[in-house]
Image: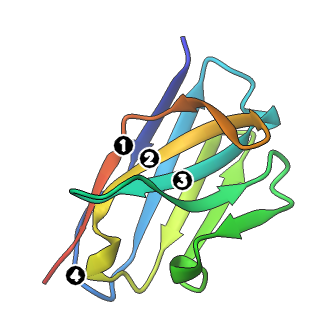
């Protein structure tokens, strides 16, 4: 059974940090490119960051490029999103997703809520 389970979300003040984790099981994690997306209330789902299967390449939404860092540990079947200098506009449900190639996504997690508010 394929599972992507996100964790690490919560309520944080502006300027704070959170580290999201996405634990994968049921498929060969090490050959999948991984991404993080987010969806704010009333808005479309938005790409946030991606990392290739080897970790050799990363990609970011422009507005998070200097604040967020995506990484992965293939030995632990986990992808991470370190989020620093958080802003209220980062408030959303964050999802991880797995792609075997061409950035078409085969598997999605259930999401974790991130709320940035004072």
Q: Quadrant of residue 59?
A: bottom right
Ranked by sequence position, the earlier of labels 3 and 1 is 3
Q: Quadrant of the N terminus?
A: top right
Mark 1 lies on a secondary structure that is: loop
Q: Are marks 3 and 1 in contact (CB under 8 Å)?
A: no
Tell me how far mark 2 sits from mark 1, CA to CA.
4 Å
Residue 113 visible in the picture: yes
Q: Are marks 3 and 4 in contact (CB under 8 Å)?
A: no
Q: Are marks 3 and 2 in contact (CB under 8 Å)?
A: yes
Q: Residue at x 74, y 42 (%)?
A: 74
Tell me how far mark 3 sits from mark 1, CA to CA.
10 Å
Location of mark 3 (residue): 36
**25 sits to left or right of 19:** right
Q: Quadrant of the C terminus?
A: bottom left
Q: Residues within 10 Å of mark 4 (few under 14, many from 20)?
A: some
User: Is residue 113 positioned above or below 76 on the image?
Assistant: below
Q: On residue 111, which mark appears? A: 1
Q: Are marks 4 and 1 in contact (CB under 8 Å)?
A: no
Tell me how far mark 4 sits from mark 1, CA to CA.
20 Å
Location of mark 4 (residue): 13
Ranked by sequence position, the earlier of labels 4 and 2 is 4
Tell me how far mark 3 sits from mark 4, CA to CA.
21 Å
What x and y, as percent, mark residue 2? 56, 18
Q: Which tag is nearer the camera, tag 4 or tag 1?
A: 1
Q: Residue at x 72, y 56 (%)?
A: 51
Location of mark 2 (residue): 95
């Amino acid at each position: 059974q394929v599972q992507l389970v996100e964790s690490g979300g919560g309520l944080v003040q502006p300027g704070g940090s959170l580290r999201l984790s996405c634990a994968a099981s049921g498929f060969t994690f090490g050959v999948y490119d991984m991404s993080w997306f987010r969806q704010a209330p009333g808005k479309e789902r938005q790409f946030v960051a991606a990392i290739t299967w080897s970790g050799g390449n990363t990609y970011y939404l422009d507005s998070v490029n200097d604040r967020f860092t995506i990484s992965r540990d293939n030995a632990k079947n986990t992808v991470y999103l370190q989020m620093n200098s958080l802003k209220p506009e980062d408030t959303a449900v964050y999802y991880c997703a797995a792609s075997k190639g061409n950035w078409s996504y085969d598997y999605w997690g259930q999401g974790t809520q991130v709320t940035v508010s004072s």
